[in-house]
Image (cartoon, grey):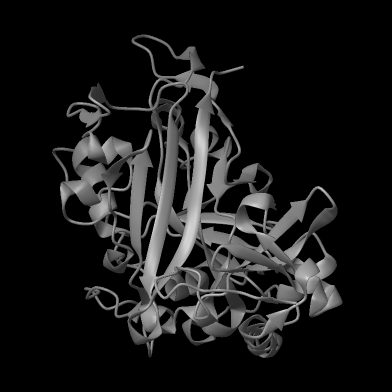
Amino acid sequence: MTRIAIPEDSLFGLANLPYGVFSTPGITPRVGVRVADTVVDLTVLDDVFAAPSLNPFMAQGHARWVEVRERILSLVSGDVPDTAVHPIGAVTMHMPFEVADYVDFYASEHHASNLGRLFRPDSEPLMPNWKHLPVGYHGRAGTVVPSGTDIDRPTGQRKGEDAPTFGESRRLDIEAEVGFVVGTGSALGTPVSTDDFGERVFGVVLVNDWSARDIQAWEYVPLGPFLGKSFATSVSPWVVPLLALEAARVATPPQDPEPLPYLHEKNPWGLDLSLEVTWNGQVVSRPPYREMYWSPAQMLAHMTVNGASSRTGDLFASGTVSGPAKDQRGAFIELTWGGKEPVTVNGEPRTFLEDGDEVAITATAPGPSGTRIGFGEVQGRILPAR
């Protein structure tokens, strides 16, 4: 039997207990929980965790999530069977859930305003609808990939002088985001209220919404992002349960004008998450999620208010997380002001991503009694276009 040692400053202590899917050379992919620098095989607790995905467990619903979290806490607080404990460095992490649908929002007023100033310098930064609803687009579930997956530089049409050109993206970018994983779905024709968010959403991941800005700029009028976004979206391997984030809840920024009734929240679901973006090993931005104008509960309510169904494994992301300061901008198009103000990365002036570049996004949040909760990282490296 093994007693897991948990340092006091561990981001993966008993207040966190995030879920992921792992394997080792002798063990097929299954669900585990991270405790300090170890992964505990949860098949010793329940056969539902023998699946190579969290979906069967998530589908069991909120009451079951609460019950199993207590059982996990009891398990890892005592002696754990030796065969169930694996050093974090000895496991391979996989996609933690099967993505049913993927929706990406645009919920940061700072990000939306900055892009408005860049693209429409002679107009109001925000479009007239922006403060009335969480703007979003529907992405491709099949191109959501786990952290560590290399990203091929996309190709497509780009705006030319007299006619479009075709070739590889020259303005490849990132978007540091937070994603929310639906645990129990809703039937077609049945909207989900903001009050139901805490029972419908299972957990939180980090997201990098890779973005080809030149492809996007040519295609997005009038229907919005398409090929400039759909080539790849990366997610972190650990799903932090919403149950672990009660101490991180904060109010959202003041919303003016007052949202329509279906977007009202009795207890707002703002979250005090601190993100960090590294570019080739150098920290270039620290976006604060607590600055996000629209909450994830409002996003889910808006996503289903027309009667759209939701399913176990649906992923909806926040859109770029940005704060008011320059070093809090979560996309390189903002950070470099459209490429006009390069940032220095390892001694070199940089604007957009070059082949071989690596980007990692990490985050922490407050836990109970002064602790911190970690989300791990979402990381990817750019490969040349095929």
Counting from the top left corner in percent of width and height, residue 132 is at 33, 67
Counting from the top left corner in percent of width and height, residue 32 is at 70, 67
- Does residue 335 appear to the left or right of 268 in the view shown? left
Give the camera-side residue of 106 and 45.
45
Residue 264 visible in rendering: no
Q: Residue at x 51, y 71 (%)?
A: 300
- Does residue 266 appear to the left or right of 85 in the view shown? left
Give the camera-side residue of 14 and 119.
14
Residue 299 visible in rendering: yes
Quarter residue 270 falls in:
bottom left
User: Which quadrant: the C terminus?
Assistant: top right
Quarter residue 358 falls in:
top left
Give the camera-side residue of 348 and 302.
348
The relative height of residue 140 versus residue 239 in the rendered view (above or below) is above
Residue projecting furthest to the left:
122
Q: Residue at x 57, y 79 (%)?
A: 192
The relative height of residue 41 versus residue 175 in the rendered view (above or below) is below
The tally of labels here is: 0
- Does residue 343 appear to the left or right of 303 in the view shown? left
The relative height of residue 36 versus residue 262 in the rendered view (above or below) is above
Q: Residue at x 28, y 61 (%)?
A: 288
Residue projecting furthest to the top:
162
The relative height of residue 104 versus residue 149 in the rendered view (above or below) is below
- Does residue 41 appear to the left or right of 309 in the view shown? right
Q: Residue at x 48, y 52 (%)?
A: 377
Give the camera-side residue of 358 and 120.
358
Counting from the top left corner in percent of width and height, residue 374 is at 45, 65
Quarter residue 353 falls in:
top left
Counting from the top left corner in percent of width and height, residue 111 is at 28, 51
User: Which quadrant: the N terminus?
Assistant: bottom right
